[in-house]
Image (tube, rainbow, N blue to C red):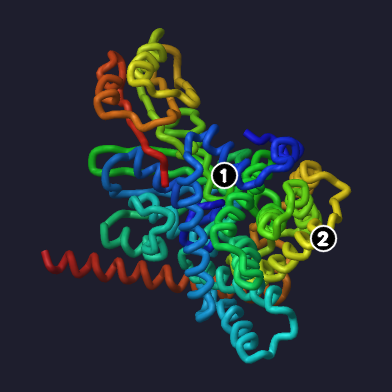
């Protein structure tokens, strides 16, 4: 088992990072490398499907979001975007995945569903724009997963445990390391890409409006997909994180503990308790109560019908 | 990487669906009635994140990537399964913790567990026994009368079958009374081996659960 990023730096020096993780999985869990690669090929396909479906738009469960990818795609197709295509696509694909997620579509948790747009946004945009072999993307998913699993040794990967830093923060670190890998970076550079990315998300709270994975989650995934690309860029240029990745993770855990409960997914603080957030929250509650009442009435009606039929 | 799943939250849909599924697998028959007791932070967020669909979906046997999860409550109603949600403080546990009581025509089961993120779960109570079930490997769940030699008799059978034990955990309600053993193994257990374990004197029930998808 790889116990820390320091340990990864030692065993992964001068080696292909995906190979390192595949070997460990084979030793630890007895799962052959080709089986893991096949499973991740499937994940990449699900991500691609999700990105394609997500650009059609459609309202989310709470009707707060859902058409962001559609709008950005239309602007991009019409030549009305000003950023470079890689950046636009990273945002677009992250938005598409999160749109699907908000409609309860099938997605890949990466590492979670609420942060599931960041990794596919970064990796699939890079694959297209820099003509990366799809098989390299599959291996980059091994790297992303491996980075996430080392973080998970010391941190719970959920907004409820430590705020959004534990979700989108970790996703951004995983994606940054994977992008550095895809662009030919070393193990050292991948680890520093992860550290730079994660460091800059520390303190990020989880304050979903109405308790839904919609606001600010959907757009946040897009913005952090871009953030992850920039972290990888710095690391590939030789910029290092002064604080080693293991210590960044420790800091994240400590900050997560210090965050009040209201900023850890409970929808009892932050954006969720702004005037607009509260108004949306109470509307959603009313609608849910109404639906429940309708369901109860329907059940009652069916029961009555059964009774009279007897 | 995390699982392929139905959105919108891996803690609230994938993990909770798996917790529901654990209850269903331990019950080992179609449920008639399922009660979910949600720890306060989960009770505050479960509807928005679709945990209600997911818990119900898992408890009627759906997988986390089953596109019918959003319809699970309606499907359960069609199956005439009674579903109840309530808030219940579970003490000093992970925010996303739930206790599930599930009843079928002939059997009933109870579990308590947490969804800790990325679809990962930790079940720490099964039918009143302390445990540490994660559902990520094939597992034996043994209910028996506490007495000397039980562990060695069970592990002898596993050794005969060349099955490697990854971890083993025992607990009991009272010395010499109801006891429980959880054994996580590296490879599937054949029916014949399970029959041998079930035939051990004082074994009330030996259940084999495959990895919870």
Q: Residue B58: which numbered mark, if any?
A: none
- Is residue A258 at all visible to an observer of this figure? no
Separation (CA) of disc 1 from disc 2: 46 Å
Q: Are marks 1 and 2 in contact (CB under 8 Å)?
A: no
Q: Residue at x 34, y 32 (%)?
A: B208
Give coordinates of residue A220: x percent, y percent.
69, 68
Closer to viewer: mark 1 or mark 2: 2
Compared with residue A47, is residue B154 higher up or lower down, i.e. above or below?
above
Q: Residue at x 49, y 47 (%)?
A: A36
Count up the numbered dots.
2
Q: Residue at x 79, y 58 (%)?
A: A236
Mark 1 crowd level (few <14, some 14–19, many ≥20, 10 Å Cα): some
Q: Residue under circle 2?
A: A234
In this view of the protein, which residue sits in the foreground, A291 or A182?
A: A182
Q: Chain of mark 1?
A: B
Q: Quadrant of residue A277?
A: bottom right
Q: Are marks 1 and 2 on the same chain?
A: no
Compared with residue B135, is residue A296 higher up or lower down, i.e. above or below?
below
- Secondary element at image label 2: helix
- Is residue A44 at all visible to an observer of this figure? yes
In this view of the protein, which residue sits in the foreground, A27 or A135?
A: A135
In this view of the protein, which residue sits in the foreground, A141 or A254?
A: A141
Going by the image, does B104 lie left or right of A151?
A: left
Q: Residue at x 86, y 46 (%)?
A: A243
Give coordinates of residue A200: x percent, y percent.
80, 58
Q: Residue under circle 1?
A: B89
Compared with residue B144, is residue A302 higher up or lower down, i.e. above or below?
below
Give coordinates of residue A112: x percent, y percent.
58, 56
Mark 2 crowd level (few <14, some 14–19, many ≥20, 10 Å Cα): some
Going by the image, does A214 lie left or right of B152?
A: right
Q: Chain of mark 2?
A: A
- Secondary element at image label 1: loop
């Amino acid at each position: 088992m790889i116990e820390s990023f320091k340990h990864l730096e030692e065993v992964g020096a001068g080696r292909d990072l995906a190979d390192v993780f595949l070997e460990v999985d084979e030793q630890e869990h007895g799962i052959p490398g080709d089986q893991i690669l096949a499973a991740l090929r499937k994940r990449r396909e699900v991500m691609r499907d999700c990105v394609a479906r997500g650009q059609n738009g459609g309202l989310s469960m709470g009707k707060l979001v859902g058409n962001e990818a559609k709008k950005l795609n239309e602007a991009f197709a019409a030549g009305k975007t000003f950023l470079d295509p890689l950046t636009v696509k990273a945002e677009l694909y992250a938005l598409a995945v999160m749109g699907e997620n908000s409609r309860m579509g099938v997605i890949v948790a990466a590492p979670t569903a609420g942060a599931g747009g960041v990794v596919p946004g970064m990796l699939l945009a890079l694959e297209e724009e820099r003509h990366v072999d799809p098989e390299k993307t599959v291996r980059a998913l091994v790297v992303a997963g491996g980075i996430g699993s080392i973080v998970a040794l010391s941190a719970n990967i959920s907004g409820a445990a430590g705020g959004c830093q534990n979700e989108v923060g970790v996703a951004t670190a995983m994606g940054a390391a994977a992008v550095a890998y895809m662009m030919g970076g070393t193990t050292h550079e991948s680890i520093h890409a992860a550290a730079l990315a994660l460091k800059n998300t520390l303190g990020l709270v989880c304050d979903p409006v109405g308790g839904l994975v919609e606001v600010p989650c959907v757009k946040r995934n897009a913005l952090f997909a871009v953030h992850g690309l920039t972290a990888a860029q710095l690391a590939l240029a030789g910029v290092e994180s002064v604080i080693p990745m293991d210590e960044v993770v420790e800091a994240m855990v400590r900050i997560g503990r210090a965050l009040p409960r209201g900023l850890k997914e409970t929808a009892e603080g932050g954006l969720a308790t702004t005037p607009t957030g509260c108004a949306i929250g109470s509307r959603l509650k009313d609608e849910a109560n109404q639906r429940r009442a309708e369901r109860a009435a329907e059940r009652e009606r069916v029961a009555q019908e059964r009774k009279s039929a007897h | 990487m995390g699982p392929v799943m139905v959105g919108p939250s891996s803690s609230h849909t994938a993990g909770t669906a798996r917790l529901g599924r654990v209850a269903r697998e331990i019950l080992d028959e179609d449920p008639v009635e399922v009660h979910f007791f949600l720890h306060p932070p989960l009770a505050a967020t479960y509807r928005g994140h679709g945990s209600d669909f997911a818990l119900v979906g898992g408890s009627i046997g759906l997988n986390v990537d089953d596109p019918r999860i959003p319809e699970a409550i309606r499907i359960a109603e069609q199956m005439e399964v009674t579903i109840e949600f309530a808030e219940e403080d579970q003490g000093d546990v992970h925010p996303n913790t739930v206790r599930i009581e599930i009843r079928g025509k002939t059997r009933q089961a109870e579990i308590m567990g947490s969804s800790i993120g990325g679809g990962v779960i930790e079940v720490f109570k099964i039918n009143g026994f302390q445990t540490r079930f994660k559902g990520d490997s094939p597992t034996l769940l043994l209910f028996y009368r506490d007495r000397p030699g039980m562990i060695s008799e069970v592990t002898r059978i596993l050794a005969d079958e060349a099955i490697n034990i990854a971890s083993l955990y025992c607990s009991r309600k009272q010395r010499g009374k109801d006891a429980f053993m959880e054994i996580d193994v590296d490879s599937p257990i054949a029916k014949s081996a399970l029959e041998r374990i079930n035939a051990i004197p004082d074994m009330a029930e030996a259940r084999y659960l495959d990895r919870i998808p």
